[in-house]
Amino acid sequence: KKGSIMSTLLISLISDQTTPNLLLIKEFPQVDRHLFVTTPEMERKNQSEHLRQATGLAAEQIEKIQVEADSLDDVQQKLEKVKFADDDHFLVNLTGGTKLMSIGVYNFFRNLSSEMFYIDIRKHTFRKVFPVVKRKENPLKYELSLKEYLTGYGLVITNEADINALIRDSAYTTAFYKKFLSFSEFDHSLISALRANRKKRIPLDETESTMLKKRWGFALEADGYIDKHEIRYLTGEWFEEYVYNWMKTFLKLDDRQIGAGVSIKRQDVENEFDVLFYHNHTLSVIE
């Protein structure tokens, strides 16, 4: 049907797997408008909104139509009701949805000015399946962040400002790891005493302060006192930070891809993970 302004539209088929749609939307930032082809079940799961939030698209950039997942006729009829301009151009992501939804969308847009794609997550490529071209596969240039991946599945990082803000720098943590391997019984007794006060700011006597500074090289933020985040570090979080630093260096990750002590929430369920990272299109957890 005729509209008033020519534009480029990206068509996304909504399903439980958010990543393929998210990747192609990020691959084509120049798109003017988006059409989400969804189903009542996907809307009950809020999948369209999860995708919108992960991409950062404004609500006014998106039009949604709900179709019956197992009906070619319904897909055809719903698409015919959408207002398109005669010279609109369509980029169609066939990766999501049900097989019948993909077939229905393909049948509709193949008679219009369109390009159709299929995402291969394992290869991190997108394949042009229509029209036929010699070079079918293209690399996906965009790398998802940990936050984008989690948001796409309805997960919220509740402590986003803290997951890359380490208590001590990498050099100190590496040195502390080496010291820890040769700790004496007295060293461990002090750690045990600190562990009983993990949620408090407590005073230290002169012997304890000297031990921290001289033996462990641990500079206190306030003389004579140790704060609760410093206690958390000495009683175990140093190891989280050591693993975080090691994985970040070994895999050449940046802050967008990895976090330590990551708290996530989905609806009313909360969890915390020692180290969480997104690499090679896979979410990995270290506990």
Image: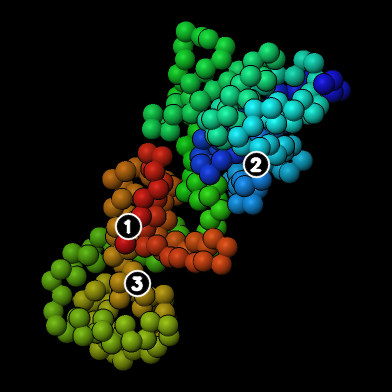
**For mark 3, does the 10 Å Cα neighbourhood hold few (<14), some (14 to 19), or many (20 or more) residues?**
some
**For mark 2, does the 10 Å Cα neighbourhood hold few (<14), some (14 to 19), or many (20 or more) residues?**
many
First in residue order: circle 3 vs circle 2? 2
Q: Is residue 42 above or below residue 128?
A: below
Amino acid of disc 3: Tyr
**Residue 159 visible in rendering:** no
- Label 2 – label 1 distance at C-alpha: 35 Å
Q: Are marks 2 and 1 in contact (CB under 8 Å)?
A: no
Tell me where residue 109 sits by quadrant.
top right
Q: Position of residue 92 (x, y in %)?
A: 61, 25
Which of the labelled discs sits on residue 286, or is there none?
A: 1
Identify the residue shown where x is 39% and y is 67%: 167
First in residue order: circle 2 vs circle 1? 2
- Label 3 – label 1 distance at C-alpha: 17 Å
Q: Are marks 3 and 2 in contact (CB under 8 Å)?
A: no
Q: Position of residue 264 (x, y in %)?
A: 49, 61
Q: Is residue 164 above or below residue 3?
A: below
173 vs 110, nearest the viewer: 110
Q: Position of residue 82 (x, y in %)?
A: 78, 29
Position of 212 compared to 117: left or right? left
State which quarter of the image contains the C terminus: bottom left
Question: Please, what secondary structure does the residue beneath circle 1 have?
Answer: strand
Tell me where residue 262 sits by quadrant.
bottom left
Q: Which residue is mark 2?
A: 39
Q: Which residue is mark 3?
A: 233
Amino acid of disc 1: Ile
Tell me where residue 55 sits by quadrant.
top right
Q: Position of residue 213 (x, y in %)?
A: 28, 77
Q: Are marks 3 and 1 in contact (CB under 8 Å)?
A: no
**Residue 111 visible in rendering:** yes
